[in-house]
Amino acid sequence: MLCHRNSDNALRTAPTARRGVVVLQRGRRYGSCMSATVEVVDPNAAVRVFLDAYCTSTAPLNYAVLLTGPWGAGKTHFLKTYLADRKRAHIYVSLYGVSSASEIDDQIYRQLHPALSSKYTKLGGVLARAFLKGALKIDLDGDGRDDGSINGGLPEIDLNDFAKNAKDRLLVFDDLERTAMKPANVLGYINAFVEHEDAKVVILANETEIEKEDPDFKRIKEKLIGQSLVILPSVEAAYPELLKLVTHPWAAKFLEMSKAQVLDVFAQSEANNLRVLKQALWDFERVAKGLRPSDLAHTNELKAMLQAIVALSIEVRTGRLPKEQLQSLKANRWARLFRRGKEETKSSLELSEDRYPGIDLRPAGLDPDLVVALLTRGYVEPVEVQSSLDRAPPFISPDAEPIWRRAWYGYRSTDAEYAQSMAALEAEFVARAFVTPPIIMHVFGIMLNAARIGYGRPLAQVQKDCRAYVDDLAANNRFDLTIARPEHLRTDSGYDGLGYIDVETPEFKALANYLDGAINKAWRKMLPVAAEKLHETLKAEPDRFTQQTTINNSPTPAAFWDVPLLHYIAPEEFAKTILTLEPAAQISVLQGLSARYQRGDASDVRTLELPWLAKLRRRLLTAARNLGPMSRHRLKTAVAREIDPLLPAKVSTPKSTGP
C-alpha cells in the first residue's frame, strides 16, 4: 500500500483538487505508512496553499473565505495553528452565544485598542456601546457605589478606526453556527468589512448545519463568500496535541508508541471528528489507570484492547452504536453470525464490527461489562479492570483459565485446540464438576453448538445428557445456589462477561427451563437451612446478619435482601436472640428489619414475612414487661419506631390499658 508524499508544488498544479481539499482515500492504513517511514498526506495542505495566496494578495479581493466541516473536524485548531505558523496578524472573534452586533463590536474594539482592557477603561463590553442612550451610572471598582456617569450615546464600531488600526490584519469569525443571532444577519454584518474596507475575512462554520436552520444563509453567502474550503481532521498533526491532554504517564507513552494503531482505527471509523478521538483516548486512559505492573508486559494484547476501546468509544459517541447494544458484545460473534439469516437486517453492533474488519471489538481481557461501565458511567474502578484481565490469558496462566471459558472461545482455535478443549470440558461434565447454574448454562450452550457444527454426539443425545446432568445434581443437592435467584434463571445477560452460546435455539431454551425448574425446587428445599444459618449469624455477628438481609452499600453482596426466608425462624427464638444482644445491636437489627421491608422491590418478602414480623413484635413486647426500666423503654421505643409503621394499624396499635 502506497502513501504519497506531500508537495505544495504538486498541490498548486493538481487538476483534481476540488475546493482546495485533498482527501485521504478510504482504506489507506496509517499502520502501513508508519512502518515504511513515509509521510502521511496532509488532508488540508491545499487549504494552506489557498490561504497563503488569499492573505498575501495585494489586490482587492472583496470576498470572504469560509472554512467549513463537521463539528470536531478541527477547524479552529487548524486555523490557529496556521496563523501561528505564518505569524499572521489577525483579529479573532468568537461568535459562540453572541446575540447582538454590539457584542461583536466589543470584541473587535478591544483587540483594536488593547489598552482599553483594564477594568477601569474596558468600557466596550461593560457599556454595550451600540445601545447605550442617555446617562449611565458606572461602578468601576466593584465596590457597589457609582464612580461616574457617561452622557449621550456611544457609536457602533467605526470602520475608519478599523481601517486605520487593523491594516493587514486578517479578520477571523469562529463558530458561526453557534451564534444566537441569525447566521444570515451575521454575514450581513461581516459584509460591511469586506465590501467597504477590503478586509480579508475568514469564517469558520459547520455550513451543513446552518443551511438546515437558516433559509436565508445560502442566498447571502453567495454574495459574501468567494471560496468555501472543507477542513478534514488532520489527525496526524493533532495527535501530539491530543496526547498532551492524557495525564497518566504510562498511558501517554503507550498511546504515543501505539500511534499507528490508533490512527488506523480512526481512519476506518470515517468519523472525521477529532473531539470523539480525544474522548476515546481518555477512555483508554481510564482503563490504563487500573493496570498492574505485571499487566504492562503484554504489549500486543494491550494494543488490541486499545484499538477495541477507541473503536467502541467512537461508535458510541457518534451515535452509531446505541449503548444498550454494548451488552451484545457478550455473545459469541461467530455463533451469532452463523445464526443470522441472509435476509435479516444487521444490528448496529454488527455494522460496527463490519466497519473495523481487522479489529476484534472484544479482545482478550476486555470484558463487555467493563466496556458498558466505561461508556455509560464514564469511569471504571481499578478492581473492575483487574477482574476483567484476570479472566483470560495472557493476563493469567492458561492453566488458570476455566475450561468452559476456553471452550467458549473455540471459534478462535484450531481444530486440534478445539478438540483438546472439548475433551477437557467433557471430562468435567462427566465428573459433574460444574455446579453453579449460570456456568452449567454456558456448558450446555457450548455442547449444543458443538453438536450443531458436527462435533461429538448428536444434538438429541446432548439434550438427553444435559437433562441427566441436572437430575444428578438435584438428587444429590449439589447445586451451588449462592448466585442463583429463585423464580427464574436469566439467559439474556449471560454470565462472567460472556453471553450464552445457542441462546436463541429451542434446544437451549428447553434446557434452560428444565434447569430453572430444578433450581427452584432446590432453592425451596434450601431456604429453611439458610434461615437457620442466618439465625446463627444473628447471634454471633448482628451486623453481618443485617448486611445479608438488607440492601446496603457493603462491598459484600446482600444475598438474601429479596429472598423470603425469615419466616422459617420461630418468632419466639428470634425474639430471644434479640434480647441477648447489646443495646446498640438491638436497635441496629430492628432498623435493618425496617429497611428490609421498605427498600427495593421485594413484594414476595413482605407478603410472606410481615405476618411473621407481627408475631415477632408481640413476642418482643411481651418480653419487655420483664425487663428493667431503661431496657423496656428502649425496646418498646425501637419497636414503635421501626416495626409498627410496617404493620396494619389494628396489629401495631397496642390495646389500651386505661389511664
Image (cartoon, rainbow, N blue to C red):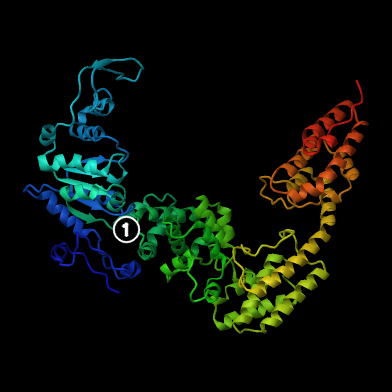
In depth, the one of 359 and 609 nearer the eye is 609
Question: Does residue 186 lie above or below 315 as drawn?
Answer: above
Q: Position of residue 339 (x, y in %)?
A: 55, 75
Query: Where is residue 614, by image quadrant?
Result: top right
In the rendered image, the quadrant that contains the N terminus is bottom left
Q: Is residue 90 visible?
A: no
In the picture, measured across the screen, residue 165 lies left or right of residue 544, that is left
Instruction: Check disc 1 and give the amino acid type.
Output: Val
Q: Position of residue 186 (x, y in %)?
A: 23, 41
Kind of element beneath mark 1: helix
In the picture, measured across the screen, residue 328 lies left or right of residue 482, that is left
In the rendered image, the quadrant that contains the C terminus is top right
Q: Position of residue 125 (x, y in %)?
A: 27, 29
Q: Residue lying farthest front? A: 215
Q: Residue at x 30, y 52 (%)?
A: 74
Q: Residue lying farthest right? A: 626
Question: Does residue 342 lie above or below 567 as drawn?
Answer: below
In the picture, measured across the screen, residue 30 lies left or right of residue 593, that is left
In depth, the one of 357 and 235 nearer the eye is 357
Question: Does residue 448 lie above or below 519 as drawn?
Answer: below
In depth, the one of 513 and 262 nearer the eye is 513
Q: Position of residue 380 (x, y in %)?
A: 53, 52
Q: Residue at x 26, y 44 (%)?
A: 183
Q: Is residue 570 visible?
A: yes
Number of marks: 1
Q: Residues within 10 Å of mark 1 (few under 14, many from 20)?
A: many
Q: Residue lying farthest left? A: 59
Q: Which residue is mark 1?
A: 235
